[in-house]
Image (tube, grey):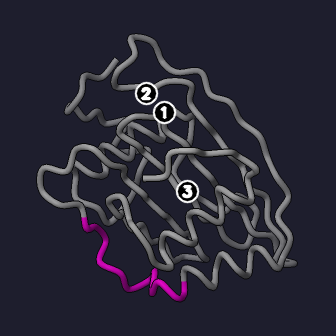
């Protein structure tokens, strides 16, 4: 078990990013708790992932792999506890949803409206506590990008992430 604030090599390796080390460590520990590996398309055209680390809820990951025909496979992983609070590793519930090309196109359009590929990598304010990290990653061909936002209130970046939640069929009551 890793204590709050500590970062292991596993955490750093789990999340290759443009984020500074403390944020990459936080994201990496969330990915590791969910059993997620570094983002790669694994036989698909491209891959995207939304990692949602909320202060008062277990971590969630939504990974969208896009096939050559434009359709997608959305893998959802949800821990049953926060890994930094509980004594034991969380159990992870996982399911997969087939995503139609039109919905994939809507997701990508939201990221384009957000200027995802040119956004500043992070906007986390110093001392941020009660809220959530919203990390969106993309691997399209050789291009990789990660962008982290702290509890975004509105905008295309938030819309893209919320679309993945909607497509997953998960019912989430606390969006922050």
Relative to residue 13, is residue 172 drawn left or right?
Answer: right
Q: Which mark is residue 45?
A: none
Q: Quadrant of residue 146?
A: bottom left
Which residue bears the numbered disc 2?
Answer: 82
Relative to residue 118, is residue 38 drawn left or right?
Answer: right
Q: Secondary structure at mark 2?
A: loop
The relative height of residue 50 versus residue 11 in the rendered view (above or below) is below
Q: Report the magenta residues as a range.
A: 112-123
**Camera-side residue of 103 and 138:** 103
As drawn, the residue found furthest toward the front would be: 173
Which residue bears the numbered disc 3?
Answer: 39
Q: Earlier in the sequence, mark 1 or mark 2?
A: 1
Is disc 3 surrounded by few (<14), some (14 to 19) or many (20+) residues within 10 Å?
Answer: some
Q: Nearer the viewer, mark 2 or mark 3?
A: 2
Task: Give the Cα distance between marks 1 and 2.
Answer: 5 Å
Q: Secondary structure at mark 3?
A: loop
Q: Residue at x 36, y 49 (%)?
A: 132
As drawn, the residue found furthest toward the top would be: 87
Task: Give the Cα distance between marks 3 and 1.
Answer: 20 Å
Task: Give the Cα distance between marks 2 and 3.
Answer: 22 Å
Q: Is residue 168 magenta?
A: no
The x, y position of residue 148, in whole percent, is 36, 63
Q: Tags 1 and 2 in contact by the CB under 8 Å rule?
A: yes
Q: Residue at x 41, y 25 (%)?
A: 83
Is disc 2 surrounded by few (<14), some (14 to 19) or many (20+) residues within 10 Å?
Answer: many
The relative height of residue 26 versus residue 125 in the rendered view (above or below) is above
The x, y position of residue 1, in whole percent, is 34, 17
Q: Residue at x 77, y 74 (%)?
A: 103
Is disc 1 surrounded by few (<14), some (14 to 19) or many (20+) residues within 10 Å?
Answer: many
Which residue bears the numbered disc 1?
Answer: 58
């Amino acid at each position: 078990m890793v204590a709050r604030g500590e970062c292991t090599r596993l955490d750093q390796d789990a999340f290759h990013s443009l984020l500074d080390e403390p944020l990459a460590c936080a994201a990496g520990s969330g990915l590791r708790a969910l059993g997620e590996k570094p983002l790669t398309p694994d036989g698909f055209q491209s891959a995207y992932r939304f990692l949602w680390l909320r202060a008062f809820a277990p971590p969630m990951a939504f990974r969208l792999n896009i096939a050559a025909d434009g359709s997608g496979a959305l893998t959802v992983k949800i821990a049953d506890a926060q890994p930094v609070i509980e004594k034991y590793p969380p159990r992870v519930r996982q399911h997969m949803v087939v995503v139609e090309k039109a919905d994939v196109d809507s997701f990508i359009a939201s990221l384009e409206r957000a200027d995802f590929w040119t956004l500043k990598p992070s906007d986390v304010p110093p001392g941020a506590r009660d809220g959530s990290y919203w990390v969106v990653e993309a691997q399209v061909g050789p291009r990789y990008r990660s962008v982290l936002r702290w509890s975004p209130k509105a905008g295309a970046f938030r819309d893209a992430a919320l679309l993945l939640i909607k497509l997953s069929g998960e019912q989430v009551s606390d969006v922050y």
